[in-house]
Image (cartoon, rainbow, N blue to C red):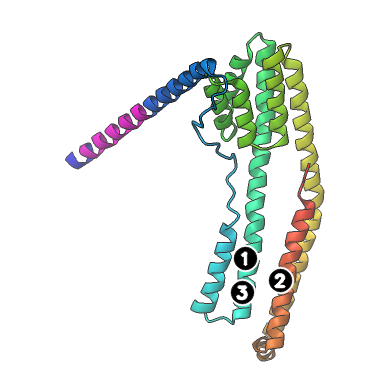
Amino acid sequence: MAEFLTAMILFAGAGVVFYLWIDARRQNIARLRLEHGFAALAEPEAAAPQLRPVRPFARRYRALPWLVGGAVAAGLWIVLGLRPIYSATAGLVVGLLGWQLEAMLAERRIQKIEVQLADAIDLMVGALRAGAGMTKALESAVQESRPPLSEQLDEVAGRIHFGDDPQTAFHSLTERVPLETFVLFCSALSVHWEVGGSLAPTLATVGRTIRDRIELSRRVRAMSTQARVSIISVMAITYFIALLMWANDPSRMQGFLSTNIGGWLVAVAVLLQALGIVWSASITRSKI
């Protein structure tokens, strides 16, 4: 019991220390920005310090699939004693499939944040038409949104709240999320901040444009599903026929695979199938 209480006290103390550190860090950032603002007034040519590096919205792991493929090839060759040509082919196929999987996950994350942006724009339009200002509308969108969009909008709202230049905050958002939809959204906010006017009709048009893009991309994916299923079916039939041939005459198949010509033919066939998957996925992916 005493050890449990001691652990709870340590965790509580660590939480308090972390909260105080976050609060002190925010105060330090606000102080630095105020100091830079006064320095910019005194010396207009002073360069703005980089207080926080720009973090990308979707972190890509392009090298990870190839590392996994290399590990699979090494494991098949060293541990299982498979022939080098089969091991290298299997590793390459794993790398290509992992590369496609990583691209698919990144595409889903992009689609998710674009749908969230369209919903957030609708919330902002409703708040603006109710009489709220742009800052209040942006804060309401932050409160109602979910990750990953809420993190990006909270960054913009926090920087404006602490006195940072809104144009710089909007530009930083387009650098973190380099998508056409966010460029359009930030451009509308930047123009409104500079010249004023009614923002609600402009944001409503931007929201409709984003939803049209999302609907078109979904139609493209739905139309390409049949082609993908056909490719997977043909590949499954190929491996099914290979298993039937092995079951009917395993000695002949083993002799064929043990020769250099047979090994190269099988490796080239598997490699062409992997390249076919990559090619079909690339031409059916939406680029709008």
Q: Which residue is mark 3?
A: 88
Residue assigned mark 2 = 271
Q: Earlier in the sequence, mark 2 or mark 1?
A: 1
Disc 2 secondary structure class = helix
Which residue is painted at 59% across and 15% down in the image? 136
CA distance separating discs 3 and 2: 10 Å
Q: Eyeballing the image, is 185 above or below 60?
A: above
Q: Are marks 3 and 2 in contact (CB under 8 Å)?
A: no
Q: Position of residue 193 (x, y in %)?
A: 67, 16
Residue 162 shows in the view: no
Residue 84 picture location, percent across and down: 59, 80
**195 left or right, relative to 67:** right
Is 18 placed above or below 134 here?
Answer: below
Magenta region, residue range: 6-21
Label 2 to label 1, Cα distance in Å?
11 Å
**Residue with the mark numbered 1:** 94
Picture coordinates of residue 25, whole percent (x, y)? 40, 28
Mark count: 3
Looking at the rendering, which quadrant does residue 76 occupy? bottom right
Please name the amino acid that badge 2 sits on.
Answer: Leu
Which quarter of the rendering shows the N terminus? top left
View extreme (left): residue: 2
